[in-house]
Amino acid sequence: MAGLRLPIESHVLQAFVSEGLKPVIDSVITFGMGHFYISQSDKGGLVFGGDIDGYNSYARRGGLAMVEHVFEQGVSMLPGLSRSKVLRAWGGVMDMSMDGSPIIDRTPVGNLYLNAGWCYGGFKATPASGFCFAHLIAKGEPHPAARAMRLDRFERGFQVDETGNGPQPNLH
Ligand SMILES: Cc1cc2nc3c(=O)[nH]c(=O)nc-3n(C[C@H](O)[C@H](O)[C@H](O)COP(=O)(O)OP(=O)(O)OC[C@H]3O[C@@H](n4cnc5c(N)ncnc54)[C@H](O)[C@@H]3O)c2cc1C
């Protein structure tokens, strides 16, 4: 409706929850080389996930190949995970940017601002992202921490590719 084309693609990310277990993990553990994360909920379920499925979709369900891949990552980090039963899984839509980093910027449309492209990390970044977004709107200039998160960085060749994976959403 605003007439904008955004450098963002919709991808599926799956999440998994195991049966309730006695306390075994008291923090979030991530496995960067394999891309896996896990924590334990107050009810005892292990909550975990890994890579996006890797294709564009608005369907909130994922493929079995990625289920197997995520479980392999998990068992290689925590072998005991293979003995717990998974109760449920679901898929959600990820707003994947081309370089894996978000966009916090004004748009070419007057008074329309953009805070999007958070990929896997929008929840945990909420306080900082909200702070930087409010700064931009109130002062009319980007907060120093968000100065590189520009909408036009993709056409100008100034990607913020923190993992050095390349210019495709399914690589991040
Ligand atoms: C399975 C899964 C696990 C995740 N785990 C984590 C995690 O552990 N930690 C973490 O930090 N992040 C995680 N994320 C990522 C996090 O959910 C997102 O980064 C975050 O929700 C992005 O917030 P947002 O407000 O930018 O966008 P969204 O939450 O996607 O909100 C966009 C809103 O816009 C609405 N909308 C879309 N089109 C229109 C339209 N045309 N008109 C009006 N409204 C519209 C949508 O309905 C939606 O409510 C996970 C995501 C998934 C799918």
Image (spheres, rainbow, N blue to C red):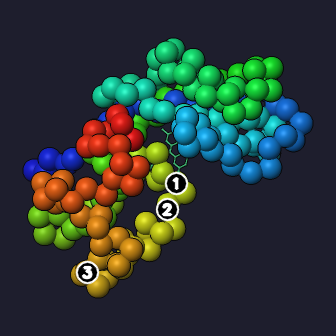
* Contact, mark 1 vs mark 2 (Cβ under 8 Å): yes
Q: Decide if ligand 1 comes within 8 Å of the CB at mark 2.
A: yes
Residue at 12%, 54% in the rendered image: 155
Q: How far apart are labels 2 and 3 at the CA level?
A: 19 Å
Residue 155 vertical placement versus 138 (above, below): above
Q: Compare residues 45 and 161 and report the one nearer the observer.
A: 161
Q: Residues within 10 Å of mark 1 (few under 14, many from 20)?
A: few
Q: Is residue 14 visible?
A: yes
Residue at 49%, 15% in the rendered image: 65
Q: Left or right: where does residue 160 sit relative to residue 106?
A: right
Callout 2 amino acid: Thr
Looking at the picture, how far across and down is residue 98, in whole percent?
27, 45
Q: Secondary structure at mark 3?
A: loop
According to the picture, the residue beneath numbered tag 1 turns out to be 123
Q: Residues within 10 Å of mark 3 (few under 14, many from 20)?
A: some
Q: Is residue 1 visible?
A: no
Callout 1 amino acid: Phe
Q: Decide if ligand 1 comes within 8 Å of the CB at mark 3.
A: no
Residue 59, numbered circle: none
Callout 3 amino acid: Glu
Residue at 57%, 17% in the rendered image: 68
According to the picture, the residue beneath numbered tag 2 turns out to be 126
Of callouts 2 and 3, the N-terminal one:
2
Q: Which quadrant of the figure has residue 166?
A: top left
According to the picture, the residue beneath numbered tag 3 turns out to be 141
Q: Secondary structure at mark 2?
A: helix
